Image: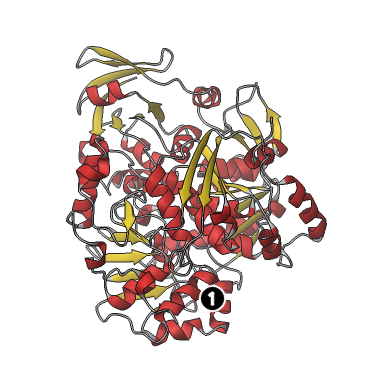
Amino acid sequence: MGKTLFEKIWDAHIVVEKENGPSLIYIDRHLVHEVTSPQAFDGLRMNNRSVRRPDLTIATMDHNVPTNNRSLPILDQTSAVQIQTLEKNCKDFGIQLFDINSPNQGIVHVIGPQLGITLPGSTIVCGDSHTSTHGAFGALAFGIGTSEVEHVLASQTLWLEKPKPFEIIVEGKRKNPHAVTAKDIILSIIKNIGTSGGNGTVIEYRGEGIRDLSMEQRMTICNMSIEAGARAGLIAPDEKTFEYLRGRKYTPKNYESLVDYWRNSLKTDSDAKFEKNYTLHIDNIAPQVSWGTNPGMTCDVTESIPFPEDFSNGDQNQKKGAEQALEYMALKPGTPITEIKIDRVFIGSCTNARLEDLIEASKVVKGRKLSPHVRAMVVPGSQMVKKQAEELGLDKIFTDANFEWREAGCSMCLGMNPDILAPGERCASTSNRNFEGRQGTGGRTHLVSPVMAAAAAIEGHFVDVREMDLN
Amino acid sequence: MKGNVIKYERDNIDTDVIIPGQYLKVHDYAELALHAMEGLDPNFHSKVKEGDFILSGRNFGCGSSREHAPIALSHSGIKAVLALSFARIFYRNAVDGAFLLPIEIEEDAYSDISEGDEIDIDISTNEIKNLTKNKTYKMKPFSEIIGKIIEAGGLFKYKPD
């Protein structure tokens, strides 16, 4: 029987395999950031261990860093200490670090592909759940905890149980690809399969609707695989993948011969078997807006807030979850999504802060002004994205419309740096999680695409971006 | 292993409510424990006792890879989380650092066990005894590797055969 792409990558990385048991898997790339690594380095020191492959380990700082003026000192002392600790750890253990002043600094899942560190067919880990992003390149990429970070630093391997392959086919063509985006595809998938629908699996996204996407859009899809509970998500590499990585800073010297190999080997065999299957038809999907406190609580922009009993299909926990979510979100069932007013807009994060995201959002903003009662920030995913966007004049489009244009970092995705919501504030956010308190204690998050966030910023409430004139 | 149950009758308890993002800069585990479950239940710290268990629904620990989540629970005194299912990273984190036992249960235990019940978990027989209600439930057995890491006392103490 044939193998899935995931199984081929897995098999190629087995160091030790036990029948019906775990496998010791080799890790090709290890990305490190300031928040989940300090205890791992402490562990190495305590046990007198070194980093086995510093040359395969790359670090940056993204979670804690302020996104305002970089020439100012970091005021939050604990953040400053975490950042200094990463600097010291990288120096002591010989690891390449893109620090706060580096032109290559940025969100770890944005810079990996931009620098050509992310490669098809490789295994990539990072102490961050959104490592699944790199799966867009046909890599097996997943988030790990700090104990596993230490294990990879020490041994370049991990003991893993083999996940099951899950096929998600995205069929059809979007009628308006500028208004209905990759974010709307992945939110639709999570809405349908649920936040634990992918538990224990690695998703392979396939079909015309995936092949049509650019690399940056594919990253948005794979990024949110973890929100469906999957271990990882991946997409078979194609000519778009190979073109994206060609000539980047760390693209290997023998790149063209690697491409020949990848082209022939990195695909699921026609007779391979998946454990699970799901198909999404995208011809008629609408822009999505999350209304609750997990990414599965999402509906079309044209719909109204659901009644908990309708959302739950008779499941008591689901019903209770929806009731608790609506209470937290201060929303009433039956309210049209387009009547929800917002206070803040965040365009950023490892899900949606790449150049294309900012270009698409800028088309909505151009020549318009921010709604007077809304505060909006645009946070490029990396300093490279920021520079490219500025070369295109996007910063000017946003600032002319009264949006804030900031330095690269995770920013308001996760409420651990100065960019947070105040209690009760409601935010249209291009990030990946709408959990309670995620963007700051008491903050209320609605997950949307960059164009939907931009449109909401202009109008002061959610609007169907398909109805806006984007020329 | 005996203890009393703190029950959260809901699915998808995420790592952001187990330990909110602003505390990921905290390295003192005792201080982390002060903020455990703060995003969901601000009274958690005052009611939790050493040796307690948490009981919850599906997909417990979804979200971030922060090991701070099982650490905060563990240093609050929680010895095990019983749930209908777990998100994978939380599950491995709990076991890798020997912070607490992630125990997968069936619907019968979930619906039957109430807040405050005293239960006795025996991972050698995969049985959970409800001492308050005088009932017994099955837990799902650990896989081979998870069982061995637990037995060894964490990932770094685990030595493959």
Q: How is the image coloured?
A: secondary structure
Left or right position of A136 against A130 = right
Depicted A7 relative to depicted A329: above or below: above
Depicted B54 relative to depicted A92: above or below: above
**Label 1 CA crowd tier, 10 Å (few <14, some 14–19, many 20+):** many
Depicted B127 relative to depicted B107: above or below: above
Q: Quick check: can you spot residue B45?
A: no
**Residue in the picture at 23% in, 51% down:** A306
Q: Quick check: can you spot residue A451?
A: yes
| Count of numbered labels shown in the rendering | 1
**Residue in the picture at 51% in, 38% down:** A277
- Near-viewer residue (A281 or A189): A281
SS at circle 1: helix
- Quadrant of res A470: bottom left
**Residue in the picture at 69% in, 34% down:** A2
Left or right position of B46 against A144 = left
Residue A282 drawn at (x, y percent): 46, 55
- Near-viewer residue (A210 or B1): A210
Chain under disc 1: A
Residue A268 drawn at (x, y percent): 66, 42
Residue A386 drawn at (x, y percent): 53, 76
**Residue in the picture at 40% in, 80% down:** A365
Residue B45 drawn at (x, y percent): 24, 41
- Quadrant of res A377: bottom left
Q: Quadrant of the C terminus of chain B?
A: top right
Q: Quadrant of the N terminus of chain B?
A: top left
- The three-letter amino acid code for the residue at tag 1 is Lys
Q: Which residue is mark 1?
A: A386
